[in-house]
Amino acid sequence: MPTHSLRVLLLTLLTISAAGQNAPTLLEGEKLAVRKVSGQAKPQDLRSYKQGSWSGSAHLWWTGAKPDDALELTLPITQAGVYQLGAGFTKALDYGIFDVWLNDQLLLEKLDLYNPEVVHTGTLPLGPRLELKAGEQVLRFVVRGANPAARKSHMLGLDYVVLAPGEKADVVAAAKSVLQVRPKSTEALARAIGYNNESVQALSATEQRKRFTLPEGFSVELVASEVTGLPKPTMVAFDDAGRMWSATATMYPCDNDPEIWKRPGKDRIVVFETPTARSPQTPRVFADGMVMPLSLLPRGRGVYVAQGPEIFFLDDNDGDGRGDERRVLLRGFGTQDTHTLPHQLTWMPGGRVLFSQGLLNRGTMTDASGASFVFNRTLVASTAPDGTDTRILSAGLNNIWGWGLGRTGRVFIHEANDLGYSVVPFEEDSSYPAYISMRLHPNAPMHPPTAWELNLGGTGFSGLAICDDLSGSFPAPWHGLLYIANPILGKIHAISAKLDERGVWSFEKRGDLVSCSDTMFRPVAITFGPDGCLYITDWYNRIISHNEIPRDHPARDKEHGRVWRVRHSSQSQSQTPDMTHVPTAELPAHLQAASTWEMRAAWHQIGERNGKELIPALSKLAADGQVADDARIHALWSLEELGHFDAALWKTLLSAPSIDLRREAVRVLSTLKVAEDTAFDLLQPLDSETQWTVRYEVLRYFRRAAGPVNANRIAWLKQWSATPPPKVEIKGWNGNYLALGGSYEQAFQDFLLSLAETKSPAAQLLESKWDKVIGTAPAPAADEQTKVQARIAAVTALLPKANAAAGRPLFEGTCMSCHVIGGKGVSLGPPLDGSSKRDIEGLLTSILAPDAAVEQVFRLYRIETKTGQRIEGFKKSESAKDITVLLMGGVPQVIPVADIKNAGYIAGKSVMLPLASGFTDQQLVDLVAYLRTLP
């Protein structure tokens, strides 16, 4: 038997026989029962600590206490007698001063557990020998304060309690006889992997391909790269002929030159004629002179383009394969931040072009009809194909870089940060939380979290795709899943989605489809292609962060970029049909295709060709209860684009068992502007409708119908609110929300009902006069910048001695008071999800010089009142009546607008203070090491 195992066995036997041999007993602190606590007491894993040794590699960790608070533990005494008590504690920077009691006897007064580093106290005697009865005793710790040098978190760590029996017992010696020390393993934390990694060398596509990891049966194929003419691609989109469109953004980023959009640029829009071929492809150029186009939507002879302050259609009038006419449809988008410009162009049912904008831009957008809209922060909107009839559909979240339309019309989006919204079932008219809170309408309820426990880890989710081809795509268990691109971690996550009987979606991570050990792999967009394979747009860059690293940093790659295809071995390489050449009479048959792309292309072509001769065949297909719901819905969408309504058909559709079919049939009534009398008669069977999404569309119909809704019909609509469900709240990001499963849905339904009664538009956004820059912080002196860089170098040199576990209390006592991770914490500063992938220099710059890496939304916000008071912090929300500012630690302060003289942002000044700049170099490296263990 190995020596270590023999020693463990002997010590175990000694402990078991202790009661019979009058031997000392060791009780693990983390296993003692908590009788009473102010704050929280729970075990803390200490396996990664290097300094000192903790029994069982853990201790009982008491947090959240303040002076005079108490922690009471049950101390079991199995045999009456005289004992001397001892205990082992943890000492650290944030630990407090305590009195220690046993029952009513003070054992130790003012035990000071402060130490600049995390260390173990060893065994400390607790008072004189005591005569104790058998049974449960009460061990109590009372907070007396903190060492002047300590951070005032008043934490306590109890490793163990030792009971040494006998009149002459030596508790320190007794502890040594029973204490089993488990040496801690140390890890080299100076990992080359990085969120941003300025020093890594770019690999060829051939070498990078060797670094991918996929489940068994999957492989990665190169579709295009910088070698074949595609540097810095932003996304790919497939047209109805099966061609793949993409755009380059070699000029990215460029936030400080508003004139750049008026000059010819260096970027291009390109087309790949045969993208599904196994070998890498070379594209043809459709347009050059572009400036960082972020999104494309091919349609007909040309393509919709989202670029800078405009969305325009680039047409090929002469058929030579080059764009020759540019028609601006929407103009006036803000360009303050080039990574949150309009994007996600998507063709939606009803012939609508959808797009979204991120949090950091503000502007006044004007559409092709001349209508103007305040277009600030994160909004989702849609417009008619000619750029008229623009509508704002939702407000909130921070950046929506993923949009997925399922075969039956269900839509999923995601928030870029892991704040409980990494997958969201989208509903028009919704208001979602954001760093700067905004509502689509003053009376709109705020949407609760939808994926609170998903915890994917990241601050830049940037692509969503649905694997819903009926055949020819991924096999089980990878079929039917949602896929999310995470360029921070360099992964493609697989997520399952399940809808329960209450209409509530739940999401569960099913693993990673793709990961890559090449840290320049940056998947910024994903989509399933005509062949059922997943296409990944790889930004391929050392730097993925927009704000932490200077815009002109030489390590920002401007040359490389790849498109990868993920294929399963069961997928055959079938010929992709060119749907633009399919005879019109055959298009309805393709609406039943197993391929989602083929089904969609047939729907598109019916609308583009204005195929009214297909109305009988489409009506028959939509009415056929033996046909799959998704095919019937696509036939309905085709009739919608052809402007056809037939009351007999709608009567059939509105009585269908399918929730999705009923929902879409109601929605199309609005598009086709069916008369209210006719629609009301058709909707009568829905008076007992239980599905929220169908009800929502009924309410939207009456809101949009011409003229006021008569009282009888309002009364009919109000029957759904006659017996409201109980009001249940849940905790979410930065506050409480009405819970899904009835409470939120009822509030949202009542909100839509109020809009129908008043014929009010959902979007009533506030144009802020307090959203400007009112000052600029002075640039740091050259010697200060030099000092910061020298400090970064000194701390980086200590990486081999980094102690991640020692960094944890520093993190929890300092960082968590202003940051969020996994949706928990205070959103005063940027979220810390994905910190395991952040580079050392970027982390240290953010800690030591937060002004050097400030993102616009986290700039210092200053309010000057009419009485001369100055209030500074993070701008959380604004209404017509007041502005709410979060002070340090997340404390809200509400200032009435009537009291404000001036308010706005201070450019170049972060709301974050350099709180950790006073740490020692060792503490800083420990903090960074812990940050890099976070998901």
Image: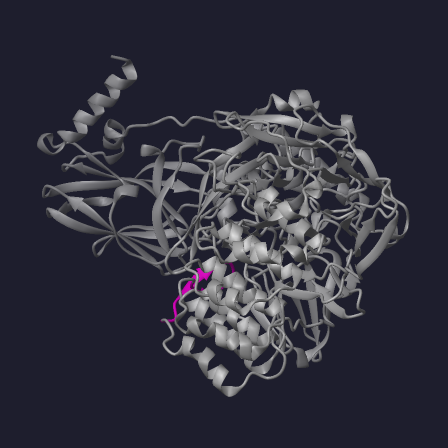
**Residue found at x 26% / y 18%:** 5
Extreme residue toward the bottom, this view: 711
- Name the spot of residue 133 as percent of width and height, x first: 11, 48
- Name the spot of residue 486 as percent of width and height, x first: 58, 40
Stretch of the chain drawn in magenta: 726-739
Q: What colour scheme does the image use?
A: one colour
Front residue of 264/191: it is 264
Position of residue 549 in the picture relative to residue 125 (left or right):
right
Residue 734 part of the magenta-drawn span: yes
Is residue 309 among the parts visible in the rendering? yes
Residue 800, above or below 506? above
Quadrant of the rendering where the N terminus is positioned: top left
Position of residue 8 in the picture relative to residue 142 (left or right):
left
Position of residue 425 in the picture relative to residue 613 (left or right):
left
- Name the spot of residue 158 as percent of width and height, x first: 33, 43
Residue 829 part of the magenta-drawn span: no
Looking at the rendering, which quadrant does residue 49 occupy?
top left
Front residue of 880/548: it is 880
Looking at the rendering, which quadrant does residue 394 occupy?
bottom right
Is residue 356 among the parts visible in the rendering? no
Looking at the rendering, which quadrant does residue 538 occupy?
top right
Front residue of 404/731: it is 404
